[in-house]
Image (cartoon, grey):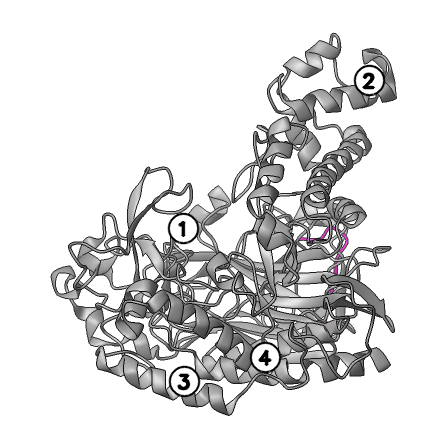
């Protein structure tokens, strides 16, 4: 899930491409250069050049004290980001990228740690509205120069535009995100980094766009009329107009797949050095407590199994039969042979994407329909047995979040439990998945208490590793939740607590007004107002009360989990967007910190200074476009082999991090080709929509799973 928040572009500076020239840019110089006219570069042909130091480009520097040096071969950037969260160079002009397939960035990372860089492309509408731009990311290892490839959205056939909807990736790999840009009139390209605590120096040798042949975008279906194109999805939920290794063409092939997988599982048994929970039999024997716990051994954090063996959690989320469920309302004509009646029809609703706010819609579950074809009437039982057998053979010892209770309650593979804490939100808050829950309400406490109670049996099993509560909440900046409380109605419990906090600190409204530079008549005026003052003098109070909200959130959850499941580990809330203030609050209460990290690897991952806690990765994935799926997901790969290599590298980097005690892939099964409730249709399954494992990634899952304890133990000895 990539979410971007970028400010408007700052000043401009025209750089002369002459050897040994060095320019130090001050805020005043940037301001003066802001009026510099944009270069007009309408390029044609196979290659389009955005930047080489030998040319005379125009560069905006989105870091007020950044410096740029040019020696005729490269431009060097020192992007500290002081006073600006997203530093880096911007090139403005007027370019025609229609038909271009990729941006090539020849870049050198000068730091002694890996760096992630981001690319943003705007047309006039994107620049004006600060929305609907195209973004992508890439990573460069420490002290490394490389040419990074950023794939551009494919041009979708004009006659089909607007007729294929409800999904994030379109046939052939075209994207809905950025696909609506006016690619013939691109106005700017921005290369930037996130806010960095460490220096971020890098060199850019060139930035160019090129045109290569897209194999899947020259197919016959590209020329079809809508009447010819639909239905585009076959009876198995697969794209009709492409073929690939592993595609199902008839029901008879399912029997062949069953026999082939039986042989594969027999040839690759469960690792012999595991205890019954998947813990490390060859490692040190610690105290057996009858439940999972955590312990730091020789400088590295570990889970410890109920029998006292070290355990590293190698797993996958969403183990179950619901992954291939997707909306069909308004799109029934997309699909071949939808049955008139079926137990696999369902209903859904969402606030995101095409179906957001449209009320109830119909769904169909292609995973279950294909499992019925594969296994017959008792498909559910056979699928559930298969899931355990597969995970064991693959070297996975954990069933991750959002998995089927029918599967993990079989008590064959350790698992985590998914809990929920909600109730009334802080009305002034906002977030991608929804507003932030108000932890001062009774509904919040009641909701987590009820969630624990309804999962009592699962939580208190020795196979339960722990519980996650909620997912990817919008924690925002260190001031955001306190600002949200101020902007909420007068009866908002978090707001009333904030006012009490301010009264205790300042005593009188006059003292508050003096510091905040406000004009409240009395304390009731603070309560009644939904306006949020902006003076920086407020920030210490906003930061302090943000911490109060965060600590209340984690404290209530921890209390209720301990009351209902005293031995169950509290695994936190799976941070996606957060700040250090929230992390410190989490660390105060949970047993294991949790983050969803969609990165190339975890070499740069570390907890905020002073936190010594185990940490688990709740989500990550990679996808490619060579198996009939329309979107790579949040981290792409060029094909299945690279996808597999990226999996191995990611998990290995986690094993080498002393704080990380596990990684959980998102997700076990394929998403619907035409998208789930919010349009996600990513190639992220370990198995496809017809329940066939992807052999390339499974080979690497096995390789790391069978060697993970050796790798971890070698890390201990370093």
Please tell me which residue lies in front, 159 or 299: 299
Residue 507 at x, y = what percent? Answer: 87, 15
CA neighbours of label 1 inside 10 A, class few (<14), some (14 to 19), many (20+): some
Give me the disc on residue 261: 3
Q: Of the two numbered discs 3 and 2 on the same chain, state the one appearing first in sequence.
A: 3
User: Secondary structure beneath disc 3?
Assistant: helix
Q: Residues within 10 Å of mark 2 (few under 14, many from 20)?
A: some
Identify the residue at image location x=39%, y=59%. Answer: 322
| Pointers 3 and 1 in contact (C-beta within 8 Å) | no
Q: If you read the primary sequence from the N terminus, does the residue marked by circle 4 or circle 2 appear first? A: 4
**Where does residue 361 sit, x and y in percent of width and height?**
29, 44
**Number of the front mark, 4 or 2:** 4
User: In the picture, residue 614 is in which quadrant?
Assistant: bottom right
Query: In the rendered image, is residue 199 in sight?
Result: no
Instruction: Examine the residues drawn in magenta and state their main secondary structure.
Output: loop
Q: Which of labels 3 and 2 is toward the front?
A: 3
Going from N to C along the chain, the mark reached first, 3 or 4, is 3
| Left or right: where 176 falls relative to 193 | left
Which quadrant of the rendered structure holds the C terminus?
bottom right
Q: Position of residue 551 (x, y in %)?
A: 76, 39
Q: Magenta residues?
A: 62-72
């Amino acid at each position: 899930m990539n979410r971007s928040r970028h400010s408007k572009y700052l000043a401009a500076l025209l750089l002369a491409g002459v050897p040994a020239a060095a320019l130090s840019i001050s805020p005043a110089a940037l301001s003066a250069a802001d009026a510099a006219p944009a270069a007009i570069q309408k390029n044609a042909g196979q290659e389009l050049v955005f930047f080489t130091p030998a040319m005379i480009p125009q560069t905006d520097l989105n870091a007020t004290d950044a410096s740029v040096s040019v020696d005729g071969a490269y431009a060097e950037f020192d992007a500290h980001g002081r006073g600006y969260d997203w530093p880096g160079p911007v090139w403005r002009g007027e370019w025609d990228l229609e038909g271009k397939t990729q941006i090539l960035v020849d870049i050198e990372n000068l730091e002694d740690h890996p760096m992630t860089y981001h690319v943003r492309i705007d047309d006039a509408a994107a620049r004006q509205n600060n929305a609907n731009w195209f973004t992508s990311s890439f990573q460069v290892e420490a002290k490394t120069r490389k040419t990074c490839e950023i794939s551009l959205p494919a041009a979708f056939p004009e006659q089909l535009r607007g007729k294929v909807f409800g999904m994030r990736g379109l046939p052939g790999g075209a994207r809905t995100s950025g696909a609506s840009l006016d690619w013939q009139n691109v106005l700017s390209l921005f290369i930037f980094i996130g806010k960095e605590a460490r220096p971020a120096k890098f060199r850019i040798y060139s930035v160019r766009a090129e045109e290569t042949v897209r194999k899947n975008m020259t197919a016959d279906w590209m020329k079809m009329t809508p009447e010819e194109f639909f239905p585009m999805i076959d009876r198995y939920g697969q794209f009709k107009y492409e073929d690939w290794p592993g595609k199902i063409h008839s029901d008879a092939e399912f029997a062949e797949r069953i026999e082939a997988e039986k042989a594969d599982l027999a040839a690759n048994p469960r690792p012999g050095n595991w205890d019954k929970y998947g813990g490390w039999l060859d490692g040190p024997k610690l105290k057996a407590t009858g439940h999972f716990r955590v312990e730091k051994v020789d400088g590295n954090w570990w889970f410890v199994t109920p029998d006292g063996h070290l355990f590293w959690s190698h797993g996958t989320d969403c183990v179950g039969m619901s992954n291939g469920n997707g909306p069909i309302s308004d799109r029934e004509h997309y699909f071949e042979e939808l049955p008139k009646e079926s137990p696999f029809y369902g209903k859904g609703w969402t606030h995101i994407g095409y179906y957001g706010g449209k009320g109830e819609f119909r769904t169909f579950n292609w995973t279950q329909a294909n499992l019925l074809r594969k296994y017959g009437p008792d498909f559910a039982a056979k699928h559930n047995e298969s899931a355990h057998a597969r995970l064991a053979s693959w070297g996975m010892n954990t069933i991750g979040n959002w998995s089927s209770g029918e599967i993990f309650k079989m008590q064959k593979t350790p698992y985590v439990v998914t809990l929920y804490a909600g109730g009334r939100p802080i009305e002034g808050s906002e977030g991608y998945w929804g507003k932030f829950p108000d932890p001062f309400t009774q509904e919040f406490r009641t909701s987590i208490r009820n969630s624990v109670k309804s999962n009592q049996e699962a939580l208190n099993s020795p196979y339960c590793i722990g519980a996650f509560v909620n997912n990817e909440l919008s924690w925002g900046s260190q001031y955001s939740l306190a600002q949200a409380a101020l902007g909420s109605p007068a009866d908002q419990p978090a707001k009333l607590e904030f006012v009490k906090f301010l009264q205790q600190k300042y005593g009188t409204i006059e003292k508050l007004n003096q510091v905040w530079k406000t004009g409240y008549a009395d304390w009731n005026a603070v309560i009644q107002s939904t306006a949020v003052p902006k003076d920086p003098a407020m920030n210490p109070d906003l930061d302090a009360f943000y911490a109060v909200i965060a600590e209340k959130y984690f404290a209530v959850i921890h209390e209720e989990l301990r009351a209902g499941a005293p031995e169950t580990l509290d695994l936190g809330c799976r941070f996606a967007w957060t700040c250090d203030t929230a992390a410190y609050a989490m660390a105060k209460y949970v047993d294991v910190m949790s983050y969803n990290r969609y990165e190339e690897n975890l070499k740069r991952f570390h907890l905020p200074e002073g936190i010594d806690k185990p940490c688990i990765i709740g989500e990550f994935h990679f996808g490619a476009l060579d198996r009939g799926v329309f979107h790579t997901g949040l981290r792409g790969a060029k094909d299945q082999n690279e996808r597999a290599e990226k999996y191995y590298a990611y998990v290995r980097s986690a094993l080498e991090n002393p704080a990380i005690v596990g990684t959980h892939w998102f997700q076990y099964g394929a998403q619907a080709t035409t998208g789930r409730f919010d349009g996600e249709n990513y190639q992220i399954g370990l198995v496809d929509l017809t329940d066939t494992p992807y052999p390339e990634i499974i080979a690497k899952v096995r390789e790391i799973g069978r060697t993970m304890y050796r790798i971890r133990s070698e890390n201990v000895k370093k």
